[in-house]
Amino acid sequence: MLCSAFNIQHSTFNIMKNYLPWLLRLLGPLLLIIFLSRSNLGELWRTMSGAALWPIALSLLLMPPFVIIKSWRWARILREMGLQIDMPTAVALYTVGLFYGATTPGQAGDLLKAVYLRDRGQPLAPAMLSVVLDRLFDLLVMAALAVLGIFALGQLLPSRGLQTALVVAMGLGLAVLTVLLVAHAPRQWALTVALPRLAPSLKASLDRWNSELGRLSLRPSLLAALGLASLGSAGFTFVRLWLLFLSLGLSAVPLYVVVGVSALIAVLQVLPISVGGMGVREVVLIPVLASYSYSAEQAITLSALFLLLNIEHIVVGFIVSFWYPLGAMQPGAGPGAAE
């Protein structure tokens, strides 16, 4: 009897363990459905049909410089790790990575860029680490600017104390990530002692990452170059999103709020609680725009235009992927090269 009850509990636990991540990813779409159910669909259509087309078109046309800057940063990281890649290939693979990232929760598909490199004769471990470092630089810049988003939401938070707590937590997180990235001793302790205790099954991977990071010289000149590239790509992102605000006539929203809110959304979209940022964007945009006397319908339309940029990344990346099929070994790239 007790054994049967234990087996039932164990089976229930395993089911919840397997399905909980997918249930969490439905949270964003569920929030979007709630927002849509409370909206005036006629007003939503009028807002969409009244959007100015030229800012939207210009925002879409700014994708190439955005991708080129990000690709240059990734290629620079790869070069520092002893992996060679030419810029055309870096741009193509980065574009394909945007496609996979935009179609997976938490943008996890972006890691497939490392698999593409392995298929082209590069070792997988440093290739995987290069993608993680590339994402980390984006996250650091966006997290720093997301503090502006917290201030933009300040008047909507229950208390000044909560706003201060969020800013302090964000600052501490940034400080810890920066120290772990730059300082050798704390990084080594985290990868070889702290994290293996929390996740013993990852010890082999963490040891390998520690070894790869030990070979990477994060000297000031390299960090400055990567930081400037990150700011440049973030700048193009904010310009593209600001143009979407203009297309809907949301001129009362200050530029610093546009930057802060966009950065905050970028950070939240990394969490595995949505697909394509659905629901997450609305959670931030609706209250912020309401504080400037704009309607929920305008906020939802703006979110849809944000999604349009993601769709552009998906479509362009999907098309490029035909020239760079996953799993296709290149001439001279034998199995031994990928070890």
Image: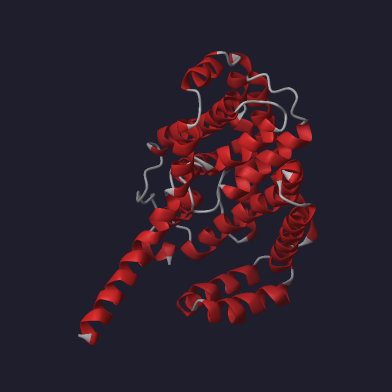
Q: Residue at x 63, y 20 (%)?
A: 248
Left or right: where does residue 189 sit relative to residue 117? right
Above-or-below relation of 68 to 195: above
Using the rendered image of the protein, determine whether residue 214 is visible from the camera's viewpoint.
Answer: yes
Residue 187: horizontal and vertical position, in percent?
67, 73
| Rendered-image quadrant of the C terminus | bottom left
| Rendered-image quadrant of the N terminus | bottom left
Between 115 and 30, the one nearer to me in the picture: 30
Between 315 and 127, the one nearer to me in the picture: 315
Q: How many numbered discs?
A: 0
Q: Residue at x 56, y 37 (%)?
A: 282
Q: How is the image coloured?
A: secondary structure
Above-or-below relation of 251 to 131: above
Q: Residue at x 73, y 22 (%)?
A: 251
Residue 159: horizontal and vertical position, in percent?
76, 52
Using the rendered image of the protein, determine whether residue 120 is visible from the camera's viewpoint.
Answer: no
Between 81 and 289, the one nearer to me in the picture: 289
Above-or-below relation of 28 to 307: below
Q: Residue at x 44, y 51 (%)?
A: 25
Residue 169: horizontal and vertical position, in percent?
72, 61
Q: Quadrant of residue 16?
A: bottom left
Left or right: where does residue 214 sit relative to residue 327? right
Left or right: where does residue 335 sit relative to residue 61? left
Left or right: where does residue 245 sit relative to residue 8? right
Residue 145: horizontal and vertical position, in percent?
74, 46
